Image (cartoon, helix red, strand yellow):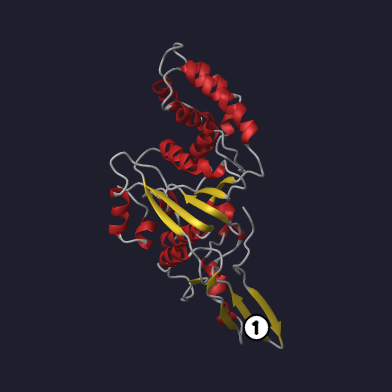
Amino acid sequence: MSRPTGTTSVIVTSIHNRRVSTTEGSEGHDRRRYPWRLADVRWILGLAAALRGLCRVDLVTNRRCPAPVVERATRLVEHNRERFVKRILARAGAEGSIELAADPADDVTRARRLLASWAPALRGTAPPSHAVLARTNAELAPYAAAALEAGLPYRAEDDGLEALEDPALDRLLATALPSPTARPASALGRLLSTATAADRRVLVTLAAWAADTPSFAALRRRVEAARTARTRLRDDDAALTLATMHGTKGLEFDVVACVGLDDGRFPSARTLAEAEDPVRALEEERRLAYVAWTRARRSLVLIFDPGAPSRFLLDAFDPAELAAAWAGRRPNGGAFGRG
C-alpha cells in the first residue's frame, strides 16, 4: 500500500488580483465527498458561479491505473449527472487488467477462492501490494477469516472479527450448546431470532464460522485457533490489506479486489431507501465505487453474483460481457486469476 505517486486529485485554488484559478485533478470531483463533513460535490460544481474570473484547468491523465481500469471506471461515473463533463485518459503504456470474477457462492467460499489465488504471490519475495475492498467492515469478515485459515498476514483497521474478542462469544457458545456433537448452525440460528442487538453482532460472526463446522466441539476449536492466529497475523507491514472503500481514498495498491458487487448490496438498497434524495444518494454510491476501482495500479478484480450483478457493473460493462465472465468459469466456479 502506498500514497499516490502520479495522480493529482485535489483542487488548488489561488486568488490573485481578484482572479481565481482552479486546477482539477484527473479524479477530482468524481471522487466521493462526505456529506457528514459538509463535503458536497455541488460546492465544486458551483464555484464558477460563485467566483468571478475562475478558470478551470482539467488534468485529464490518470497516472495510477492501467488503461482498462480507467476506461471502465470512467464509463461508470459518466452515469452521474452532478459532475463536470470531461475525458479521462490513462498514461501512455499503462498496462494492466480487469477481471470480472462471476461467483454465485457465499462470501466465505468467495473469500477462500480469492485468497487461494493470491497466496503464491503474497508468500513470495517482495510481494506486490494486494487489497480487498468492501463497502462495510462486516463484509471484510469472511476475507479476514480466510486469511487466518490460510496463514496469510494482513493489515486492517477493522477486519470485522472483533467479536472473537468479545466475552459474550463464549457465553453464547455455552448457551447454544445442546450436546457436544450437535451441529452448531441450526442452534445458533435459533438464538439469533431472540438475541439482543449486541449479541446478534457476535452471533452473526459465530454463524459464519459455523456454516461448515460439523459440531460445537469443532467450532470451539476453530474459534480458539482463529483468536491465536489473529493475534499473530495482523501486521501493519503486511502486503495484504483489508479495508472499506471509504477508508482507501488517497491510497493505491498493485492488485485490488472489490467484493460484494451484487444487486442490493452495492449500491446499498437500504441507503437508497432511507435517503432524502435517492438519486443523489445513488450518485454518491457510484462515486464510492469509482474511488475503489481506481485504487488499482496493475490489476482489478470485481467479484459479483452472475445472477444478480450490481447496477454499477451494468453501468460499466455490457450484459454480454458479464454473462461471458460467468460462462467462462462454469461448471465448478473455477478460481480467480493469480495476483
Task: Name, please, the residue furthest toward the right.
Answer: 17
Mark 1 element type: strand
Q: Looking at the rendering, which quadrant does residue 155 occupy?
A: top right
Task: Name, please, the residue furthest toward the front.
Answer: 125
Residue 245 or 283: which is nearer the viewer? Answer: 245
Side of 329 relative to 60 (left or right): left
Q: Residue at x 56, y 60 (%)?
A: 35
Side of 258 relative to 51 (left or right): left
Q: Residue at x 45, y 25 (%)?
A: 210
**Place of residue 241 in the rendered image (x, y in percent of width and height, measured from the top left):** 58, 46
**Place of residue 207 in the rendered image (x, y in percent of width and height, measured from the top left):** 45, 28
Q: Say which amino acid is labelled 1.
A: Val
Residue 36 or 27: which is nearer the viewer? Answer: 27
Q: Residue at x 51, y 40 (%)?
A: 119
Res 107 seen here: yes
Q: Note whether 320 is above or below 91 in the view shown.
A: above
Residue 259 or 69: which is nearer the viewer? Answer: 69
Q: Note whether 134 is above or below 108 in the view shown.
A: below
Q: Note whether 111 is above or below 167 in the view shown.
A: below
Q: Crowdedness of circle 1 by 10 Å Cα count: few (<14), some, many (20+)?
A: some
* Location of mark 1 (residue): 20
**Place of residue 265 in the rendered image (x, y in percent of width and height, measured from the top left):** 41, 48
Task: Name, please, the residue furthest toward the top.
Answer: 179
Res 176 seen here: no
Counting every numbered tag in the picture gives 1
**Place of residue 158 in the rendered image (x, y in percent of width and height, measured from the top left):** 59, 41
